Amino acid sequence: MKDYRIKAIARGLAIIAFAVCLLLSKTGAFTAFPLVKIGMCIILALVVIEALMEKSFFGVFFPMGIAACLFQKELGLENVSYIVIILAFVLIGIGFSMIFDKKPKISVIKDKCHEAVDGSMSDEYSEGDGTFDLDNNMGSKSQYVNVQNLKCGNIDNALGQLTVYLNNCTIDPEGAILNIDNGLGALTIYMPKDFRVSFNCDNGMGKINMHGECSNDTSLPLVTANVDNGMGTIDFYFE
């Protein structure tokens, strides 16, 4: 099973678990347990696990700060403001990122020269073998993708805001596959209007918007877009 499907299933199960906890909390059957808090912690735990896999310290400590607010009394923090608690965990995450975080290597094309840059920058980059992989957890990010003879691309946005520009890409003569996964965030993808695209969409409680139209020229290579949207919003623009 592909990674993006595993993530989608895990997120779906976490949302179902939260819904079950929410319903049980209204029955009065398990009054000894804070079921709503437990349900929210299941979702936060999933976010933390994904952040650990991505080695994002901010993504780890921010949900931990939210969990600390949920269990404020149990942790002896009842006299501490929510803002202070969240700010403290955010600063801890920033501190760990400065000490341990290793930014992904991205090759930036400027004047036909390649140079390595910080992976969090909004810049144009290229990866070899006709592939690219973009992953955004909780932040806000814009990425200009420049891949020639694109064969496969993966775009994964969890809770953040991600904008992807594919305008400078060309498609492999045999076609290409785009695996697009959006959880609770906002994902915007720009494609050239001369791309011929076939969409396979699995939409949960979110929204998928199409702006403009792709090409219908059957002589062009086909881009197959496998789109999995949870509760977020995806906007496709053809320009």
Image (spheres, helix red, strand yellow):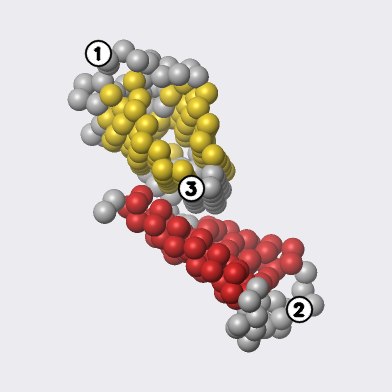
Residue topped by disc 1? 219
Give the residue displayed 41% in from the left and 53% down from the top.
8
How crowded is the residue under tag 2: few (<14 C-alpha within 10 Å), some, or many (20+)? few
Q: Nearer the viewer, mark 3 or mark 1?
A: 3
On screen, residue 235 above or below 40: above
Give the alpha-carbon distance from disc 2 to disc 3, as whole Å.
37 Å
On screen, residue 61 above or below 167: below
Q: Quadrant of residue 216?
A: top left
Judging from the image, what secondary structure is the residue with disc 3 in? loop
Judging from the image, what secondary structure is the residue with disc 2 in? loop
Q: Which mark is residue 204?
A: 3
Q: Position of residue 80 (x, y in %)?
A: 77, 74
Residue topped by disc 2? 78
Q: Is residue 24 left or right of residue 173?
A: right
Q: Is residue 49 left or right of residue 5?
A: right
Amino acid type indicated by mark 1: Ser
How crowded is the residue under tag 1: few (<14 C-alpha within 10 Å), some, or many (20+)? few
Amino acid type indicated by mark 3: Gly
Give the alpha-carbon distance from disc 1 to disc 2, as whole Å.
66 Å
On screen, residue 7 above or below 208: below
Q: Quadrant of residue 221?
A: top left
Q: Nearer the viewer, residue 84 or 226?
A: 226
Residue 19 seen in the current view: yes
Judging from the image, what secondary structure is the residue with disc 1 in? loop
- Give whichever of discs 2 and 3 has the lower sequence position: 2
Residue 110 seen in the current view: no
Amino acid type indicated by mark 2: Glu
Q: Position of residue 164 (x, y in %)?
A: 47, 33
Count the labels in the image.
3
Give the residue displayed 29% in from the left and 34% down from the top.
177
